[in-house]
Image (spheres, rainbow, N blue to C red):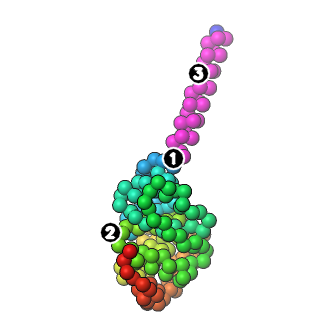
Amino acid sequence: MDIKLINHARYLKFLLFTYFFLLIGCSSRSSDVLVAPENFHQVSAQVYRSGQPTHGEMKWLELQGIKTIINLRQYHSDNDDVEGTQLKIFQVRMNANNITNSDVIEVLRKINSTSEPVLVHCWHGSDRTGAIIAMYRLVFEDWTKEQAIAELRKKEYGYHETFFPNIIQYIEEVDISAIKQQVFSHHTDKK
């Protein structure tokens, strides 16, 4: 009887360890799996948004026809993640707590300067990315501020309004005409 209990305990221990390692394996994103990045959405025919892509997700993006990656993160480069791809990378180190006209203009000019599909991302694809996409809607698609803010707040994009209420305040107060003038007066040859 003791042997049966010992074998049963060993079997349960084996099952628990197996279950634990399966959970760990399923919960982490592999950097080489070819899938869409988290929070991936198509904004327009040419503009996409997402959270931070892994190496494998960069390869997936390239397979989808995306040519340029615009990284809005302050402290993370995409250099390693795009290795082995033909993706062009461009970085504007934005602070979600302090959205500035100069950062917005720089990103929108980059979008305007290319005729190829572009992905805009930050860490989660929610706050800095949400601010840029709202400004893209206002500048390129002539949305109203109310429409842009409503889209920013959509649950599927994950905007953290509690932490970054300044983003909505920025959108409400920004002079869209001045931003448009700065974006479109810059060299606009398509590259």
Pick whichever, 63 or 94, lies toward us.
Answer: 63
CB-based contact (under 8 Å), mark 1 and mark 3: no
Could you tell me residue 154's position as x and y percent?
44, 67
**Disc nearest the viewer among 2 and 3:** 2
Pick whichever, 182 or 156, lies toward us.
Answer: 182
Residue 11, which numbered label?
3
Tell me the residue at 47%/54% (across/down). Answer: 84
The kind of secondary structure element at disc 1 is: loop
Task: Determine crowd level at label 1: few under 14, some 14-19, many 20+ residues with C-alpha closer than 10 A.
Answer: some
Label 3 is placed on what type of residue? Tyr
Tell me the residue at 61%/12% (across/down). Answer: 4
Give the labeled residue for mark 1. 30
Residue with the most extreme left position: 45
Closer to the N terminus: mark 2 or mark 3? Answer: 3
Could you tell me residue 114's position as x and y percent?
39, 74
Residue 169 showing in the rendered view = no
Residue 63: which quarter of the image?
A: bottom left
The kind of secondary structure element at disc 2 is: loop
Label 1 is placed on what type of residue? Ser
- CA–CA distance in space, label 1 to label 3: 30 Å
What range is drawn magenta here? Answer: 2-28
Residue 20: which quarter of the image?
A: top right
Tell me the residue at 56%/31% (across/down). Answer: 18
**Residue 95: within the magenta?**
no
Give the labeled residue for mark 2. 45
Pick whichever, 36 or 80, lies toward us.
Answer: 80
Residue 87 vertical position relative to residue 12 in the rendered view, above or below: below
The kind of secondary structure element at disc 3 is: helix
